[in-house]
Image: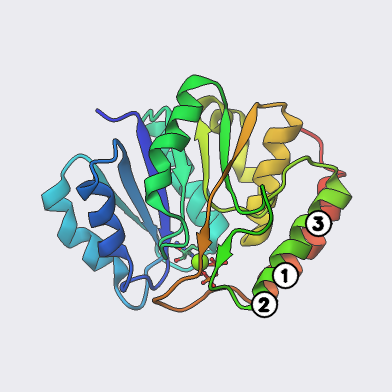
Amino acid sequence: MSQALVIIPTYNESENISSLILKIFKENLEIHILVVDDNSPDKTYDIVNKLIPSFRDKLFLELRSYKGGLGEAYKHGFKWALNNNYEYIFQMDADFSHNPMELPIMIDYLKNSFDVVIGSRYIEGINVVNWPLNRILLSVFAAYYVRLITRMPIKDPTAGFVGYRKKVLKSIKTDRIKSIGYAFQIEMKYIFWKKKFKFKEHPIVFTNREKGISKMGSRIIFEAFLAVPLLRFRRF
Ligand SMILES: Nc1nc2c(ncn2[C@@H]2O[C@H](COP(=O)(O)OP(=O)(O)OP(=O)(O)O)[C@@H](O)[C@H]2O)c(=O)[nH]1
Ligand SMILES: [Mg+2]
């Protein structure tokens, strides 16, 4: 049995999900996949269900009843991963923004010396492809804002491509995390940093989605803007 799992949250990703799953298994990456779908109106979950017989024991689906946001989907996925005793647990987007070919090297970091590995866009300059200028500015500003307020030494604090050793997720009380979008990514990082887990930022190239529709919106941005100062008053 593989010890590594990648959790992929989906909401209306019918144009991406099968090619992403097929790529991961075709390349023989030593990893299992859990898709957490929030009852997508485009029936993304149906596509996953049809693939499951071909990849028994390494492709799994958790279907939730309503759109609860990225954070809720990940919390559900993390619990599932711990119940199923995976040692190395990843979070990754479904829209090919994160290249799955980075997974083996990221798993090695966890196996050899780190508790957390972050696929980071901002190690040397800004490694994003095909993002409109306003998205780049927003993301770079967000990273700067988070570092300024929290003093957390992470260059890409909103990164969504992250791997954790089991013990990290076990130690985090995810039920207390209420944020949904960007803020969820920031909050997870703040907590493991405060808990002094050893992390590595591994440089990646982030590519804008080519297919499907963005779920990014002003609510998610506003949530993050407010959530960051509040983090400093949190006790762990
Ligand atoms: N299960 C679940 N998945 C979600 C939800 N919102 C977003 N996602 C998934 O989370 C991942 C990241 O969302 P994106 O819409 O790509 O967010 P983004 O990368 O900030 O923005 P774009 O790439 O511009 O769309 C994707 O795989 C989405 O399908 C949700 O409410 N529930
Ligand atoms: Mg995306």
| Residue at disc 2, secondary structure | helix
In the rendered image, which residue does mark 3 sit on? 144
Looking at the rendering, in which quadrant would you find the C terminus? top right
Name the residue: 60% across, 42% down: 174
| Residue at disc 1, secondary structure | helix
Cβ–Cβ below 8 Å for labels 1 and 3?
no
Query: Measured from the top left, where is residue 71 in percent x and y?
Result: 57, 55
- Given the image, on which type of amino acid does mark 1 rest? Leu
* Distance of label 2 from label 1 (alpha carbons): 9 Å
* Residue in front for this viewpoint, 199 or 221: 199
Name above or below for residue 88 compared with residue 201: above
Q: Is residue 44 left or right of residue 231?
A: left
Query: Measured from the top left, where is residue 19 in percent x and y?
Result: 26, 63
Q: Is residue 25 left or right of residue 137?
A: left
- Given the image, on which type of amino acid does mark 2 rest? Leu
10 Å crowding of disc 1: few (<14), some (14-19), many (20+): few
The circle on residue 133 is: 2
Which residue reaches farthest top? 112
Q: Is residue 16 left or right of residue 58?
A: right
Name the residue: 70% across, 48% down: 187
* Distance of label 2 from label 3 (alpha carbons): 16 Å
In the rendered image, which residue does mark 1 sit on? 138
Query: Measured from the top left, where is residue 188 in percent x and y?
Result: 65, 44
For the image, the number of numbered tags is: 3
| Residue at disc 3, secondary structure | helix
Is residue 178 visible in the rendered image? The answer is no
- Give the quarter of the image for residue 144: bottom right
